[in-house]
Amino acid sequence: MLLKDKVAIITGAASQRGIGRATAACFAHHGARVVVLDLDESAAQRTALELGSGHLGLEVNVTAPAAIQRAVAQVLKEYGRIDVLVNNAGITQPVKTLEIGIEDYNRILDVNLRGTLLMSQAVIPAMQRQGGGSIVCLSSVSAQRGGGIFGGPHYSAAKAGVLGLTKAMAREFGPDQIRVNALTPGLIQTDITGGLIHDERRHAIIDGIPLGRLGAADDVAHAALFLASDLSSYLTGITLDVNGGMLIH
């Protein structure tokens, strides 16, 4: 029970085969009271119910400051504290540089990067008041290797921005005992990637992964559990790769 009696908010956590949902289930199993945030209110509430009693599902657009503040206020009213934030909500788009329109650029940057900032800004004051907390930010191997999987260059740029933001927040809020760390998943089988991997390409990708398989959502969830729990109490500002060795550097 690594998160017993902790309150954990996870964004983008209602997708059936997503990293966020796997993380929510993992955290609940380890004793956390989980707040599932998602654009789909009914899916968020359904996910919270499936986790068991004592969990909460709320509709939130992570690019909307007022909606975020309302959700955080509701969490604090319900539970009185926020111990963990997992900035998981994200979107991608498989296009090349010359195909990126300004609306596409804004949409990808807003959800992946600005959403991470806005959610963190909303929970940090509560963490400061209670004397600490843990923020886990989801980046991507695409930020490290310069794309080349599914997301376009604007996705790589957004996820690289998440890494820089993570380190800057870790440095700023370390004195408050707020730890901020990043995860960089490799190719994970989720609802987003499931329909995009054709057999031929799947084999080519797996050939480049030393562990010989694609990642599962649970692989990332377990890494998030480590960073959220006291097992990583002396870690902040780190980037933890979860890619089966596809990017050994």
Image (spheres, rainbow, N blue to C red):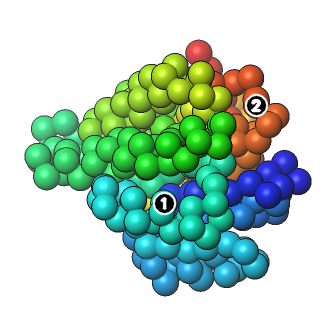
Most foreground residue, 30 or 210: 30
Could you tell whether 77 is left or right of 159 in the image?
Answer: right
- Kind of element beneath mark 1: helix
Q: Is residue 221 above or below residue 227?
A: below
Q: Is residue 234 above or below residue 30?
A: above
Could you tell me residue 144's position as x and y percent? 46, 25
Task: Please name the residue that numbered disc 1 is placed on.
Answer: 72
Dot 2 alpha-carbon crowd within 10 angstroms: few under 14, some 14 to 19, many 20 or more: some
* Residue 189, quarter of the rendered image: bottom right
Q: Say which mark, if any, is on residue 141.
A: none
Task: Please name the residue that numbered disc 2 is placed on.
Answer: 232
Q: Is residue 239 above or below residue 36?
A: above
Residue at the farthest right position: 1
* Residue 113, quarter of the rendered image: top left
Q: CA distance from mark 2 to mark 1?
A: 25 Å
Q: Amino acid at mark 2?
A: Ser
Dot 1 alpha-carbon crowd within 10 angstroms: few under 14, some 14 to 19, many 20 or more: many
Most foreground residue, 31 or 208: 31
